[in-house]
Image (spheres, rainbow, N blue to C red):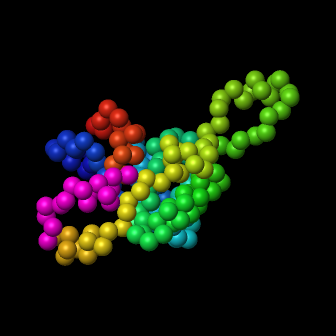
């Protein structure tokens, strides 16, 4: 169905909204479709992190985590208008903790054994908490009162570009950083 739609409409990007971490269906949607980028929308709550933990553990169990992890990116959804810096920092820390436990490679302390050094030539796939290019570092989407009410949204068929930039600018910038020469077909 997706191939038929993409052939007919030839979009620059295809977005698929899938349940996160609740079951293996979400996992197969993400891993089996060959996604170039998987945006993991998150609100900073227990349900978000437990759901993504289930998904990541499933990927580790099936051996697909190494194949998909380069395409992952956390998106901070609905960042509140009040205390947004504290909220964003807490969400980033929770995402980093989850990625460290379930997705990132363990960083082993250096040894003096030459044989161990030769066997670990490959750099571990791991990121610091504050690395803005890391998949755990959330792209921001700000909560907006006007977008929260559907009837208000439909009344504003011509959307203000500044409003769009304010709400979605971090997400758009982050996606453009992943695809600097344009989205893959």
- Specify start and end residues of the magenta stretch as a single range: 155-170
131 left or right of 72? right
Can residue 75 be spotted in the picture?
yes
Q: Please tell me whether residue 163 belongs to the stretch shown in magenta.
A: yes
Q: Tell me where residue 166 sits by quadrant.
A: bottom left
Q: Quadrant where the C terminus lies?
A: top left
3 left or right of 87? left
Q: Please tell me whether residue 152 belongs to the stretch shown in magenta.
A: no
> Is residue 147 shown above or below 121?
below
Can residue 48 be spotted in the picture?
no
> Is residue 161 shown above or below 156?
above
The x and y percentages for residue 93 are: 59, 58
Residue depicted at x 26% and y 71%? 146
Residue depicted at x 27% and y 69%? 147
Judging depth in this view, the residue of 28 and 18 nearest the camera is 18
135 left or right of 156? right
The x and y percentages for residue 106 are: 70, 44
Residue depicted at x 36% and y 67%? 143
Q: Tell me where residue 145 sits by quadrant.
A: bottom left
């Amino acid at each position: 169905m997706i191939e038929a739609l993409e052939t007919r409409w030839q979009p620059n990007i295809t977005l698929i909204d899938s349940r996160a971490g609740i079951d293996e269906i979400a996992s197969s949607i993400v891993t089996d479709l060959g996604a170039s980028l998987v945006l993991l929308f998150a609100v900073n709550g227990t349900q978000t992190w437990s759901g993504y933990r289930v998904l990541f553990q499933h990927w580790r169990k099936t051996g697909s985590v190494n194949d998909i992890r380069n395409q992952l990116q956390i998106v901070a959804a609905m960042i509140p208008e009040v205390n947004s810096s504290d909220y964003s920092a807490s969400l980033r820390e929770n995402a980093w903790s989850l990625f460290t436990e379930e997705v990132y490679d363990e960083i082993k302390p250096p040894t003096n054994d030459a044989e161990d050094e030769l066997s670990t030539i490959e750099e571990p796939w791991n990121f610091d908490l504050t690395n803005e290019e890391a998949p755990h570092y959330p792209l921001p989407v700000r909560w907006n009162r006007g977008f929260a009410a559907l009837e208000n949204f439909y009344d504003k068929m011509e959307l203000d570009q500044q409003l769009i930039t304010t709400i979605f600018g971090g997400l758009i910038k982050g996606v453009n950083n992943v695809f600097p020469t344009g989205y893959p077909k």
